[in-house]
Image (cartoon, rainbow, N blue to C red):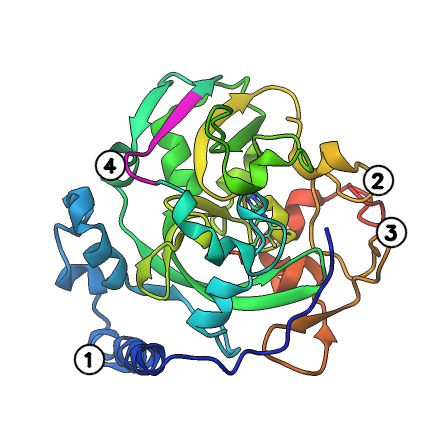
Amino acid sequence: MVSIIKKKSSRISENLVTDEKLYRQRRQFLKTGIFSSAGLSLATYFPTLAMAALSELPNRISNAPRTRTLEEELNTFEEITTYNNFYELGTGKSDPVENASALITDPWSVMVEGECERPGTYTLEDILKPHDLEERIYRLRCVEAWSMVIPWVGFPLADLIQRFKPTSNAKYVAFETLYDESKPLPGQKRQNLAWPYREGLRMDEAMNPLTLMAVGLYGKTMPNQNGAPLRLVVPWKYGFKSIKSIVKIAFVEQEPATSWNMANAREYGFYSNVNPQVDHRRWSQKRERRIGEYFKRDTLMFNGYEEEVAYLYEGMDLSKNY
Ligand code: MTE
């Protein structure tokens, strides 16, 4: 991966600013308003959302209650949607937004296979229907030493996995991104990665409550460049583990092959937990640049999620580049 840091863009459209201001105000209201002060669940006020059809998705996303906050400033919608890594749409940071229309997300289905009782092909609607959506603010730390704070909307991956009833042989979950050899996306015409993009998690990592299946951000449906219509978010790992535009989920017994590890195993491990003590072979991981900020900040162990995930790696030597 190349490491080019773009300065904060000053080109923010009037609409976007207004939109974002309203968004922040509304969220602030939801956070501190009558619902929370009365100790009532927001779900009480937005019933039946779980059963709404796909056409209702934008509505469900914009009404998703915030369940996780962070005392750090959010990156802007513009930053989050114009500075991306999505090699299927090109390797430059602005290529994904420029080529976003090449990714067709309707219709969309996900193939589920391997060690589970309910394999099959599920439409996006099947996948989303039973899940209540929530908004969670997470840090995203890219292995290239930049980071952002993003308000994702999604649901726990654990809840989805449970529906497929994995067997006791399922030790890992493998994911794949869209790849049609006869109609490659612009970036897939180059073989800089072995397509399809592949990622994987150990079963207990996949079941951790922090692991999110995201369908939107900033209260809007997931932009193509951020991995529409369905992407993983694993906030304590380097960003490349958070695979975009998922079309396949496989329950497997052995550690699955993953794209960046296949491309360069010495630089990109299977686990790839954020760890400021373990440098990348070509640069330090001790500090990071938050997009939009000038000075670098310290990188936190497990990207700041140590309390919630450190137990998963007890007994493992974290000084090794896993
Ligand atoms: N998923 C796919 N399919 N293709 C990619 O190139 N890039 C990864 C990850 N998921 C990537 C991907 C990397 S390196 C990062 S840092 C994050 O997506 C970036 O997510 P964002 O663009 O939404 O910030």
Which residue is label 1 attached to?
34
**Secondary structure found at label 3:** loop
Residue found 15% across the figure and 46% down from its top: 52
Disc 3 marks a residue whose amino acid type is Arg
Q: Give the magenta-colored segment's residue range.
A: 105-112
Q: Where in the figure is residue 45, as x and y percent of width and height?
A: 14, 64
Measured Cα–Cα span from mark 4 to mark 2: 39 Å
Disc 1 Cβ-to-ligand 1 distance below 8 Å:
no
First in sequence, mark 4 or 3: give its number: 4
| C-alpha distance separating marks 4 and 1 | 33 Å
Give the label on residue 281, or none: 3
- Which residue bears the numbered disc 4? 125
Q: Residue 36, located in which quarter of the rendered image?
A: bottom left
Q: Which of disc 2 and disc 3 is earlier in sequence? A: 2
Q: Earlier in the sequence, mark 4 or mark 2?
A: 4
The residue at 28%/40% (across/down) is: 128
Q: Return the residue at label 2.
A: 266
Residue 260, given in percent of the width and then of the height, sits at 70, 39
Q: Residue at x 44, y 19 (%)?
A: 113
Foreground pick, 151 / 17:
17
Cα distance in 3D space between marks 4 and 3: 42 Å
